[in-house]
Image: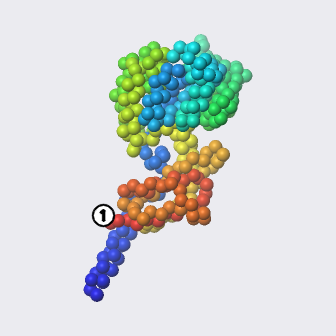
Amino acid sequence: MKTKVLVLLLITLATLQAAETDSAQSLGAIRIAKFKGDRAAAVSMTLDDGLRNQDDFAVPLLNQYGIRATFYVIPGLTPDTNEEATKKKPGDHGGISWHRLKELAAEGHEIANHTWTHIPLTKIQDGQRIDLEPAKMDEQIGKAYEAIKERIGIAPFTFATPGNGTSDVVRAAGHKYHPVIREHCERFGAWPPTSKDFTAAQANTTVDRYLKKGEVLVWMMHAVTEGYNALSGPDVLEDHLIYLRSKQDELWIDTFAQVCRYTMERDAAKLTASTSAGHAEFTLECSLDPAVFHDPLTVVIPANHPTDVLVRYQKSGEKPPFEIHSDKILVQVIPSGQPLEVTWQSVPQ
Ligand SMILES: [Zn+2]
C-alpha cells in the first residue's frame, strides 16, 4: 500500500516537474524558422553561362555531395543535342545542351534565366546610364524565360543579368517574368581574368561569416578548369562542398529558387498560436499566391526533451512531416490556414 502511494506521488511530482520545465519557456516561443529546418543560414551555388566545363567538372561533384545548384543559362546560345554542344569549347557560352539541362532539372538543379544571348542590358556611357531599348530588353529576358519554361517544363523563378549589370529599368523588366533577380552574390573565385589563386579555405571563411550573420550566401561561379574565371582545379570546389556538407546541421544548402521561395513565403506568413505545457495549437497562413508559393515552412515549437510527440491537422487528422530535437519540435507546414495540434511529454532533466 505504501509503495503504491509512493509511486503515485512520484508520478505526480514528475508530471508537475515536466509542466514546470516547459512552462518556464526559457526555450522561447513558437515561431517560424528563419530558414528551412531552423538552420542558422542558407547557401546557394549558382553557376553562370551554361559552360560545358561546369557539366564536366562541377555537376559530378554537386551530385556526389547531394547539393542542388542553380544554372543560369543562355537559351539563344543553347544547342539541342549533346553532340552539338561538344563542338563548342569547354568554356564557351551555352555549352550544355537542352537535352542535358533537362536531365539536370530532373536531378533537382534549378535551370534559370541569364538572358537570350548575354548582351549587356545596361551600361554607363560618358557618365550616363543607358538601358537597352524596351523591345530588345523584353526580348532578351522574355524570350529566354519562355524557352526555359517550354524546354524544361518549369518556369524560371530567378533571373541573373549578364555581368550583374542592373538599373531600375532592368529590374522592372526582369520582374515582369521573375519573382527574383539575383543581385547580391559572392564570387566563387577572384576577379577575372583568373581565379587560380582562389582557395577552398577562402570560400569556407565566407561561409563562416554568413553563418555568423544568419544570412543567405549566394555563390556565383563560372568555369571550373577552363574558361572564364576558371579555378585552379575541381578540388577547390570539392573541398568547399565537403565543408558545406560538414555544416549541414546549421546551414541550409539549396537552389537559389528554393531559398528565395522560402524566405519570401516566410516574410509573408502569419503564425497564430496558443501553447501550454506539452500542447500547442497553431495555424499558418500566407498572403502570397498559393499557385506559386506552396512550399512548407518550418514551425519551431520549443520543448524540453520531448517524447510521445503527436502532430496532426485538427480537421483531417493528417500528419505533416516533423522532427524531434532535444529542445524543440520542428514541423513542416504548408501555409494553408488549416489548424494543427501538437502534443508531447517532456522528460524532466
Ligand atoms: Zn554571364
Q: Quadrant of residue 88?
A: top right
Q: Please give the residue where the numbered disc 1 appears in the rendered image.
A: 349
Residue 342 shows up from this direction: yes
Q: Is residue 307 above or below residue 218?
A: below
Q: Is residue 247 above or below residue 31?
A: above
Choose between 157 and 61: the one closer to the eye: 61
State the residue lying farthest toward the top.
126
As drawn, is 217 to the left or to the right of 144? left
The location of residue 65, given as percent across then percent down, is 43, 35
The quadrant in which the N terminus is found is: bottom left
State the residue lying farthest toward the front.
83
The location of residue 155, given as percent across then percent down, is 65, 35
Residue at 40% in and 20% down: 233
Residue at 60% in and 47% down: 294
Residue at 43% in and 15% down: 194
Task: Categorize mark 1 by other alpha carbons within 10 Å: few (<14), some (14-19), many (20+).
Answer: few
Q: Quadrant of residue 230?
A: top left
State the residue lying farthest toward the right.
135
The quadrant in which the C terminus is found is: bottom left
State the residue lying farthest toward the left.
2
Residue 181 shows up from this direction: no
Choose between 219 and 227: the one closer to the eye: 227
Q: Amino acid at mark 1?
A: Gln
Q: How many marks?
A: 1
